[in-house]
Amino acid sequence: MIDFWFDFASTYSYVGAMRIEDAARAAGHEVKWKPFLLGPIFTAQLGIKTSPFNTQPVRGAYMWRDLERLSEKYGFTFKKPEVFPQRSILAARVAIIALDKPWVGDFIRNVFKAQFVFGKDISAAATIADVLNGMFIDPSPLLQQAETEPIKRQLRAFTDEAQALGIFGAPNIVVGKELFFGQDRIDDALAWANKK
Amino acid sequence: MIDFWFDFASTYSYVGAMRIEDAARAAGHEVKWKPFLLGPIFTAQLGIKTSPFNTQPVRGAYMWRDLERLSEKYGFTFKKPEVFPQRSILAARVAIIALDKPWVGDFIRNVFKAQFVFGKDISAAATIADVLNGMFIDPSPLLQQAETEPIKRQLRAFTDEAQALGIFGAPNIVVGKELFFGQDRIDDALAWANKK
């Protein structure tokens, strides 16, 4: 069992989320999805209210180009969204409800695609509803449940846990107590999991 | 021909420098070493006078652990130096003198090892002299040449060129106009070089 810590607002989390289940399965592992919010972590660690890719434009320019190349490499589509980063709190809460559902992986990938392939605003309930409708899942009860205290609390708990794990960006693959930062470290993380 | 942009003070540059020539050779490419200074770039882009691994301690803690794992993976030794980051200007200047010498790759790797394996202070001329003596090269003329204006100018020119390339950290592999940031992207860079 490996944990995949991600934020729906994160571009490299998109790349990682698209690859992690196939890569883990090929290595004989299952993925536990861990949605969290980078916002409070960036605020606490960097004192910023946006993505470091915005506050560091040189790094940002590299990331957008890199995403084009990575998408080409892995054979999926990528379009820079008009708004970056997007508010990912609603998507993360619905993902938390979905954690014990068989469709959790598809839901997560479809939300990422809504944002990074189709240019949709994932902070809008209508976008999340469209994603769910496209999977033949009734969005209403899920969108209602997403606003309840236990779900909100669980997202805060995951974000606290991410901080306690020493997370400073996304995505991360966590194997036991070992943290692997970045989609480019998936293979290292799986090799580590196989060593044990 | 691929360009390897590195700073002797950078831990991930150590990992990359140890791997790049073998990896490039296996892929049918030659490496052009490009020493530069991260300091002026961090000051310009981040407004800091030290490494971001120091100003962002959570990220720093991850990096030190990651270096241990990477060294284990690639089979080389790593010891956290007492001073980090070290002043790399002298080592970079001597590397510039060495660029057209057959021993440039060995010199670069040996300076990295002096710092990250043997815990030596690479800002000291005595350390650079020891590295050169160990390679049966007389250090005196090189250390003198390192203080001359053409060499100083070339290092400033490389640092300016790094900034113009959109470099914001180290190491980087540059193929044509494509920048690949991080030692974990060596394979991507070589695959890119082979596509052309």
Image (cartoon, coloured by chain):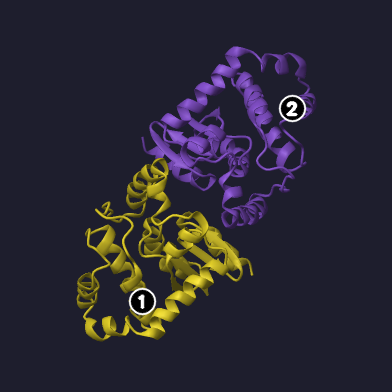
Chain colours: A yellow, B purple
Report which quarter residue B135 is drawn in: top right
- A101 above or below B55? below
Does residue A31 appear in this view?
A: no
Relative side of B190 to B153, left or right: left
Q: Quadrant of the C terminus of chain B?
A: top left
The quarter holding residue B139 reads top right
Mark 1 falls within which chain? A
Percent of width and height locating residue A102: 36, 81
Residue A110 seen in the current view: yes
Q: Which residue is mark 1?
A: A93
Distance from the alpha carbon under mark 2 to that under mark 1: 56 Å
- Residue B60 coordinates in the image, percent (x, y): 60, 53
The local secondary structure at tag 1 comes to helix
Which residue is pictured at 58% across the width and 13% down the height? B150
* Front residue (pair A58, B45): B45
Chain letter for mark 2: B
Asked whether A68 or A21 is in front, the reply is A68
Above or below, comparing residue B182 to residue A178 in the picture: above
Q: Identify which amino acid the numbered label 1 is placed on.
A: Arg
Image: A87 above or below A46: below
The percent coordinates of residue A115 (x first, y second) are: 27, 61
Instruction: Identify the amino acid type marked 2.
Output: Ile
Q: Which residue bears the numbered disc 2?
A: B128
Q: Indicate the quadrant where residue A105 lies.
A: bottom left
For mark 2, give the secondary structure.
helix
A62 vs B113, left or right, is: left
Residue at the image position 64 percent from the left and 51 percent from the top: B67
* Mark 1 residue crowding within 10 angstroms, few (<14) / some (14–19) / many (20+): many
